[in-house]
Amino acid sequence: MKILFAAAEALPFIKVGGLGDVASALPKALAEKGHDVRVVLPLYSSIKPEMREKCHYLKYFYFMHGWRNSYCGIFEAEIDGVTYYLIDNEYYFKRRAPYGEYDDGERFAYFSRAVLEILPQVDFFPDIIHANDWHTAAVPVYLDAQYRGREGYEYIKTVFSIHNIEFQGKYGMETLESVFALPSDWAPVVEHDGCMNLMKGAIERANAVTTVSETYASEILDPYFSFGLDSILRPRQFKLSGIINGIDMKTFDPASDPAIPVHYSLKTRKDKVKNKLALQKELGLREDKDVPMIGMVGRLTSQKGIDLLYPIMEELMKKDVQLVILGTGYPEIEDFFRFCDAAYHDKVRAMITFSASMAQKIYAGADLFLMPSKSEPCGLAQMISMRYGTIPVVHAVGGLKDTVIPYNPEAGTGTGVNFQSYNAWDMYNAIERALDIWYDPVSRDKIMVNAMSGDYSWKKSAEKYIRLYQSV
Ligand code: ADP
C-alpha cells in the first residue's frame, strides 16, 4: 500500500508531544512491513540545524490557496525506510515554535492544502492519506471539496486520527472562505456550534476515524471527555475505532539508551538503582538508594491532572520520598512546581524546561512514575516508564487504563497502580499503595519484571492500522 502520513510534528525533526513520536514510529513500523510510507510535515525554523542538514532540496512551486498564490518548497529526507517531505514556506513556518501563533489556523490551512498539492509534484498518489489532529484535519475536507475531480485524486481514501480531542481548530465562520478557502456551500460540513471546526469536518469526511486507545474511543462519545464533539461522533461510531500507540522500543531501551548513565536490562535490573543515585547526585538530592523517587515528565497542563497534587503535596512531603518533575506548560502550574522546589528543596526538584535526555534519566532513575491525567488519549510516558522498570501510578482513563495493568499482590500480576475516580486523595492512596509495593522486595522485583517484559512496540498496532487501511 502507498500511505501518506500528514502531521504537524514528527521525530526526529520536531516534537512537541506524543504526536511527534507517533508520526515517526508508526510510519517506520508500516515501512518495515513492506509498505511505501511517506510523511509530510512543515519545515519549521525551530528544527535543529543537524536535522535540517539531513534534508535535501527537491523543488519549489506555487499554488493557489483562495486568492493567495503561495510559495511551496519541498525538502526531502530518507530515515528508517520512510521518506519525509518537509514543506518550506518561511512566511508560515519561520516562527518561534511550531504552535501558539495568532495565525495558526491560516498556517495549518496552508499546510493541509500543501499536503494535497505536492502529490503530483513528487509523483506520489497514495492509496491512503492519514491525517492527524486538527492541524491536518482540513486535508480530508479539501480533498472532497476541491480535489476529487483532479486526475490522481479520485480514489484516495482518508483516515483521520484524533490524538487529542481538546484541540479542534475552531475559528469564526467568517474565516471559511477568506482563511480556509472553502466554498460557502461547504459551511455545513465544517460548522459546529456556530464555529468553523476543522476536526468536526474531518470526522465527517474521513473514511475512517481513529483515536489512540480503545478506552478513549468510547470515552469521547461522552460529553465529559468530548469537548463538545460527542454529538458528532456518536452517529459516526460505525467508522470510529481505537488503536493503541506503541513506543519505539529501540529508542526507549534502558540497555542501550545513550542518555542514561548506567545501562540495564531485565536480566541486570538490579543496576537500575545506580541511575537513581546518579540522578540524585546530578540534582543535588540526598544520595540514598532507599528513598523512593517519584518522577513526573510531561506537559504541565490541566489535562495532565496536576491539580490533584495541590491538596496532597503537604502530606506527601511528610513522607521520606523525593519528587522530580520535568515539564513546561501553564504558567500557574510551572509556578506551583517552582514553589514546591523552593519550599521542599531537600526533596523536590522541578525542571521547567524541555529536555529529552533529562526525561530519559528520570524514566531510568525514578522508582514510581506519576501520571494522574484527567483524560489521556493514549499516553506514551507510562509505557516508557514501564519499559524502564519504573512503577506507573495512573488515573484509570483512556490509554492509561488500557496499558497499565493494576498490580495484584496475590497473583503477582500487573505492571502498575491505578486509581478510578479523579480525586486527589484517591491518587494519594494509589501513591501509598505503590510505595508499599516498592518497599516489599519481592513485589518490587515482580512488578519490575512484569513491566519490563511488556510488549509496548508498534508491531500489533501497525497491523491493526494496516487492516483498517485495507478496510477503507
Ligand atoms: P502528550 O502527547 O499528551 O504530551 P504523551 O505521554 O503521549 O503526552 O507523550 C509525551 C511525550 O513527550 C513523552 O515521550 C514525554 O517523555 C515527552 N515529554 C513531555 N514533556 C517533556 C519535557 N519537558 N522534556 C522532555 N520530554 C518531554
Image (spheres, rainbow, N blue to C red):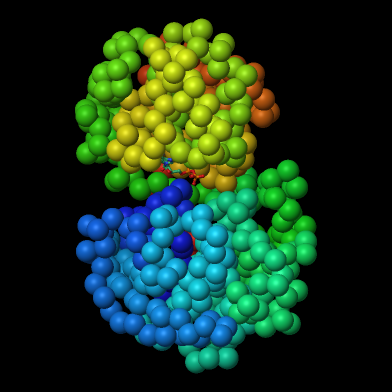
Q: Which residue is located at x 57 percent, y 27 percent? A: 418
Q: Residue at the spot x=67%, y=83% of the render? A: 183
Q: Which is nearer the eye, 69 or 429?
A: 69
Q: In the rendered image, which quarter contains the C terminus? A: bottom right
- Work out whether residue 70 or residue 377 is closer to the camera in this orientation and state it: 70
The percent coordinates of residue 131 (x first, y second) are 52, 66
Residue displayed at 42% across by 85% down = 62
Identify the residue at horizontal 55%, vertical 69% (top origin).
106
- Residue 82 image point, x, y percent: 32, 66
| Vertical placement of residue 307 versus 188, above or below | above
267 or 9, nearer to the observer: 9
In the image, is 136 to the left or to the right of 196? left
Residue 89: % across, % down: 39, 72
- Residue 252, can we see it? yes
Q: Is residue 276 above or below residue 68?
A: above
Q: Quadrant of ligand 1?
A: top left
**From what the image shows, is residue 259 above or below residue 14?**
above
**Is residue 161 at least partly visible in the picture?**
no
Q: Which quarter of the picture shows residue 355?
A: top left
